Image (spheres, rainbow, N blue to C red):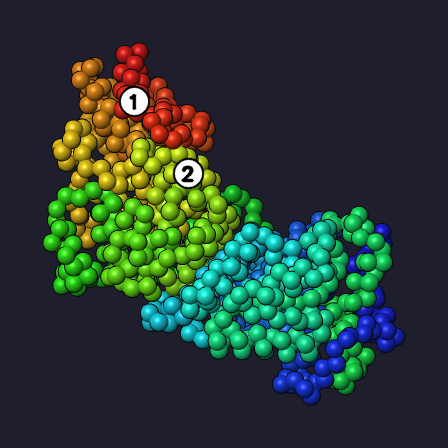
Amino acid sequence: MFNRTEIIDKNFTFRVSSGEFPKSHLNHKFDYLDVNKHKLIQIFESQVSSRHIDIKARLLKDKGRCFYTIGSSGHEGNAVFGNIFPYTDMAFLHYRSGPFFIERSKQINKTTPIYDLALSFMASSDDPISGGRHKVFGSKDLNIPPQPSTIASHLPKAVGAAFSIDRSANLDLVEKKLEHNSIVLCSFGDASSNHASALSAINTASWIRAKGGHVPIIFICEDNGLGISVKTEEHWIQQNFSNRPYLNYISVDGLNLFDLIKKSKKAEKISRLERKPVFLHMKTVRLMGHAGSDVESGYQTLKQIEDAEFNDPLLHSARILIENKLLDKESILNIYENTRNQVKHVFNYSINRPKLETAAQVMTSITQNKNPYSIPKKPSEEIRSQIFGKEYRRIDMPQHMAKLINYALCDLLLRYPNTLIFGEDVAKKGGVYHVTADLHKKFGSRRVFDSPLDETSIIGFGIGFGHNGFIPIPEIQFLAYFHNAEDQLRGEAATLAFFSEGQFSNPMVLRIPGLAYQKGFGGHFHNDNSLTIFRDMPGVILAVPSNGLDAVKMLRSAVREASISGRVIVFIEPIALYMIKDLHIEKDGKWSFNYPNQDEEISIGKFKSYGSGNALIIITYGNGLYLSLQAKKIIEKKTKKSIKVVDLRWLSDINYVALVNEINSCKKILIVDECRKIGCHGEGVFYELSKKLTSKVKIKLHAAKNSYISLGVAATATLPSKESISKKGIEFINE
């Protein structure tokens, strides 16, 4: 196959010179549109700039100097969106949005879009958005958060951001980032529209509208008819989205500047004035294949490739400019060649800009945050008494974990005006375990609200709200349900700081009731004992409290950390301990605690020790602490030796220096982990301690079997128990 990049480049010059242009079935005229001549020419110049960037990137890839070659060729029509929509409208862009980015840059003085994109293509550490970590379209000034993944995973958070706009205005949020009349733009490809994340987002936007809510978002589906090599049926997008309830569908010719301008303004009017979601279906073509390594001839005929190339958007734009006497052939060719030289000069200079070289340099941005929030003052007791109502009289009484978390959430909503609580059944019902009971009554539906039954949208809401000044506290109803949407946390929320060098953040405290040991409501889907996924998310903080007192203090620390550092915190609440009041015997009340003063927190990474013996140290967390303290009593009675139990509490940020100092005098360590042995956090603790302990220490891991959780009386059969911990501890001491 001939070099299609070179052919497309030469064809433009030849066909403009010869007047051999593709025809259009539309007859819009310049005079018909509310747009001036200079603006139209400016849009064309952005289209040309994007094209030459693609061409140059392909040339440099062949020389090993460019590391990303998915270009925007064929999608140059999206330059119109970069012109029509002001930069105050947040834009979540897919990877063919070069023309949009270049054109939007012209709304702000002293921007250098070609240089910025050149640095990004070449993975230079000078790249102003990602610092060389990924090729992304992103800019803080232009209100474009970088998108690490573009297979529709950005749509749920775009919906969340759109939903947040009117909410932030209604609440008069001081921290809001988006103007009260702004909208959100979200672009994606036709193939991506089939992705679960896309369908989830679009459905949720419609769901909110059905309930009377406002979602000012424009979904821009850039339909080139291909998902890499898989063809999209000609009418699939229209048939799938044109008749959806509460979704305004608009079709636009992505090859025609006039139609793009007309339909963009129509979409804007609906979304901005009526606060409704719009599906803008832009039909276009794809040129130069999917990426530099893509061989189109493997799945397309030469005629199909050439037909697409003859429909080049640049040729259509040139024809429109000439027909409307806005530019002549010579002017267009001058723009084309002058732009080529400009791009060549900028890219050649960018080649030698510095690159990331060390692991430390790469990792610097994982937890960066350049936009910290201040911590509000504590509310007065008078205000607290009004909000707590009848519960204020009980606040000093010992309570179980569920009630104490409820009190903590109430105080957090009161102290932090930018916090929200949402999820399945959290509002009127108060959660399936009543942890959020009465919060909806106290704070209203603007602060505490139900979501659709869709975990993807729940976390997407969280990310989107985080983009607009909120500290969201979403709830996933059960740990097992989280896995339906784990990419929203791993691929989107966790990576934002990394790919933006802390310029963007989506602070969040994600509450998840989970873990095992429920005896009355069993089965795997309500007794998920796997936290493995959270071991593999750099920058995400994982908290697992074991009792109500710690839960309150840790939850406060989590919200503080999200506010100051922009961090994402996953807060796992052991369901089996929600209602537990006793530890050893009935009515001993040793697992009921008084609600702590507002100032009391537990800093991230701080563990707690129970006992002072060194015959054996048990390291554990969550339900494991409850069971290990019961086992401790048995072990000490039978061995006549004192042992110590350490509750890690924070599983992602373990302070190993302090932990080693705490346990270094002991020769035997038993790690008790309620999660499955393969992939549990205990594995990591085992490894780290074996490296860091200076003396000869024996370490054993007692974890759950590599099994799912059964129903009924067998629900705990595969899990560590008071008896099994006691047995292993006694045997270990007596070795």
Picture residue at 68% right of the left edge, 53% below the top: 227
Residue 702 or residue 146, whichever sits in front: 702
Q: Quadrant of residue 618?
A: top left
Which residue carries the number 1 mark? 725
Q: Is residue 240 visible?
A: yes
216 or 49: nearer the viewer? 216
Q: Quadrant of residue 218?
A: bottom right
Residue 126 visible to the viewer: no
Density class for disc 2 (Cα within 10 Å; few <14, some 14-19, many ≥20) is some
**Residue 300 relative to residue 127: left or right:** right
Quick check: 81 above or below 356?
below
- Which residue occupies 28% across, 59% down? 440
| Residue 486 or residue 731, whichever sits in front | 486
Q: Position of residue 617 (x, y in %)?
A: 27, 24
Horizontal side of 515 relative to 233 (left or right) equals left
Q: Nearer the viewer, mark 2 or mark 1?
A: 2
Q: Which residue is mark 2?
A: 525
Mark 1 is on which residue type? Answer: Ile
Indicate the amino acid at tag 2.
Phe
